[in-house]
Amino acid sequence: MTEGKVYQFKDCELDLTRNCLLRNGREVHLRQKAFQVLVRLIECRGRLVTKDELFTDLWPDTAVTDDVLVQVVKELRRTLGDDPHHPTFIKTVPKSGYRFICEVDEKGSLLSYTEEITRVEFEIEEETRTEKLAVPSRSLVSYTSAGLRPRILIGAASILASVTVAVYLGVFSLRNAAEVRMPSIDGKTALAVMFFDNRSGDAELDWLREGLADMLITNLSRSHKVATLSRGQLQTLLERAGHKEGAPIQSSSAMEIARKAGVDTLVMGDFARIGEKIRVNATLLDAASGDLKAAESISVDSPEQILSEIDLLSLMLVKRLDSAGEDDTAKIASAMTDNLEAYRCYSLALEKAQGLNNTDAIELLEEAISLDPNFAMAHARLGHTYAVTWGLVEKARPYLARAFELSDRLTGKDRLYILAWYSIANLDYPGAITHFQRIIDEYPLETEAYLRLGNLLRGERKPAEAVSVLKRGLVIDPESPVLHNSLGLIYSERGNHNEAIAMHQKYVDLAPGEANAHDSLGMSYQWAGRYDEAIAAYSRSLQLNPKFEIAYAHISVAYFQTGRYEKALEYVNSYLETAPSDLEKGRAFSYLSRIHQARGEQQRALHFAKQALDSGRWYVGDLLSIKVAMNDRRAVSELRPKLLEMPMVSNRGLRVSERPTLYYQGLVALSESDTESALDLFRRSLQNSPYTWDIDSFEDCLGRAFLRLGRYSEAVSEYERILRLNPNYPLARFHLGEAYRAMGETNQAVENYRSFLEVWKDADQNIPEVAAARRYLQM
């Protein structure tokens, strides 16, 4: 009889034998590190467990930040239902660590074994199949599964004690991995490639554990007869199964994961350095029975040869599956590159681009191309980075054109992607939508296609369709950070703040070390009017990556929108120093102009507006608005046509909103006393998506116009609409106070001026609106 520990506390049970946490009798999912932290806190219950102690015990030889531990504790609180302000389970000791404060009942969990038995057969009946497991003498047996009915047939000598031996069993208890499941596709073999095992333990080769799996997934997915589980989906399943990162994957665990994911066939493998050579072995296993279907291997003289030989291994495996025709053979045999260093640069660049670290991504892709000038997908991804993740479409076209020239090295799926990216580079958004829809039709597991299609539909002002597409992508990959990010952006634009914040918090949970995740969370807080939380999220983004320039712009906006102009200027100047292109420099000058204009410093504002326009025609609006305020008719007449001559850019792969252009046109019309045209332009402006992240979303353009025209009741209605969208919208309460004062409604004016000063309690003291509100309240 072997004893394992079970800890019971309130409605929870932590079973170390089965490596699981139950709440109200139901197993709940915890990531492996969170599970380990919980175990450590419970084992040391009643005393302080310091951060250093947790880092030393649970992250040995790994450099991690305090935020990693904070996120783990947040996950534990969410899972346990613990309130951090009134904790029941985990109490935070500021700057020191954590203490588990709940009363715990500790007991043993029984694992049964057989003693002096020559053979034991378990006949396990399930709805769909019967399995027989032969267990050798004196082995430790444990199994649990909901809905199974064990029948034990014991043949041989004496056994120990009673039949507690067979009822409560638990060795192969895996976390619920069925949330990620391959759809059934006629004519395709559903296949999962597990991470490879480093048999020789050579640290220099350890990257091949996941690298070989990546290469095989890429190659095998090119066959029209094979549907492969993505690396992200595999990572999710392994994590939920409690697999320790870097540890070998046992075949029993792999088979259980594969079955729960709806996979027919399993690829498992290992590699080792043998003398001067490296040998790679791969086996095909039947996921249901564990039967060996085939085994193949390759040997290379150096790691550099693996990239060329992996194509041969892929082809051999597909042929063994008896599902590859001549067309598939051609697709798999066409390697992307035979240069190992080029491939590594390419892989790293994809990660950088996903996190919007565009400068680093471009540098890596350029390095890949210098190593292999015929690396078609490196050219294509360079074009993709410029056109889709950055918006610089003119820079993208030469690289995409070069990728087309190398199309003999591309698969049909690759060519469809490049067609879609090229459509975006030409601002042909309907064409891009068609191409991505075709990719989804032909390759329904391509989550990137769902992401891009959803974003394009968002740009075409079809938010409901966009949400539907992105949710379909999450069915395939429920742990995709980028899909959660895109959904959060759509919800935020629509004013669904709780949903937006939840999506971006999930993004942070999935990628806690990624600066863009915290930046996205900050944007959703900002549009909800929760500025302090936005600033905290942006600050965390910059802590993680001080070179993540866009976070400097966003945090400056949050300070500006709460009247902290000095602080905003500080961060805009930091943004200007890190700006990687003229587009970003122009934005920095534009922000400087807006801030000085808000401070009443017209000449400074004019100076920076000219610099913004010198950086790009996109920033003509700042100078135009200043000239309108100066009543400089000649300058307005010269600048007005430039509004319709905007440079070719995309908004990170989707159509640019016309809201700013229509606003500035309305501003000019209003200055010319063309009232109805101006109001019509402002209304049309508001029908376009807001730049929720920008220094001015122009959400109150119609309200400002009504105030200027003396139509105060309409202004009140418009500002009340805005406050329902964002209860702390910049200057909204001040303008409401102005409208009520003009209408002679003193009490309403006083209430709104006071609310304004409360929202802007930390604002700079010399701001004109702050001074005006205080003067009125002192009257």
Image (cartoon, rainbow, N blue to C red):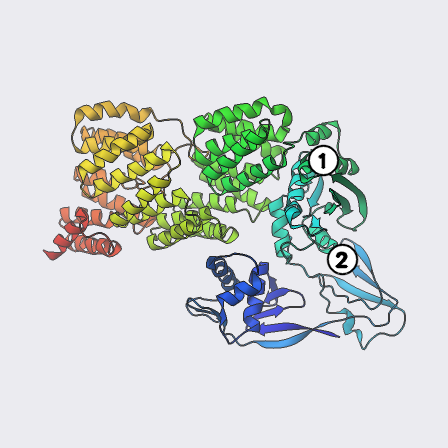
Identify whether 226 is placed above or below 207.
above
Q: Answer with left or right where residue 552 lies relative to residue 162.
A: left
Work out how far the residue at label 2 is from the one at label 1, CA to CA, in angstroms: 42 Å
Q: Position of residue 769 (x, y in %)?
A: 18, 48
Residue behind mark 1: 309
Q: Earlier in the sequence, mark 2 or mark 1?
A: 2
The residue under the point 25% across, 42% down is: 595
Residue 179 visible to an observer of this rendering: no
Front residue of this view, candidates 704 and 241: 241
The residue under the point 16% across, 30% down is: 631
Disc 1 residue type (three-letter): Glu
Residue 317 visible to an observer of this rendering: yes
Residue 594 falls in image quadrant: top left
Give the position of the C terminus as an image quadrant.
bottom left
Q: Position of residue 694 (x, y in %)?
A: 34, 41
The residue under the point 76% across, 73% down is: 164
Front residue of this view, candidates 274 and 82: 274
Number of disc labels: 2
The residue under the point 51% across, 50% down is: 511
What kind of element bears circle 2?
A: loop
Residue behind mark 2: 126
Give the position of the N terminus as an image quadrant.
bottom right
What kind of element bears circle 1?
A: helix
Identify whether 677 is placed above or below 140.
above
Q: Nearer the viewer, mark 2 or mark 1?
A: 1
Disc 2 residue type (three-letter): Glu
Front residue of this view, candidates 186 and 453: 453
Q: Answer with left or right where residue 119 lies relative to residue 775.
A: right
Cβ–Cβ under 8 Å for marks 2 and 1: no
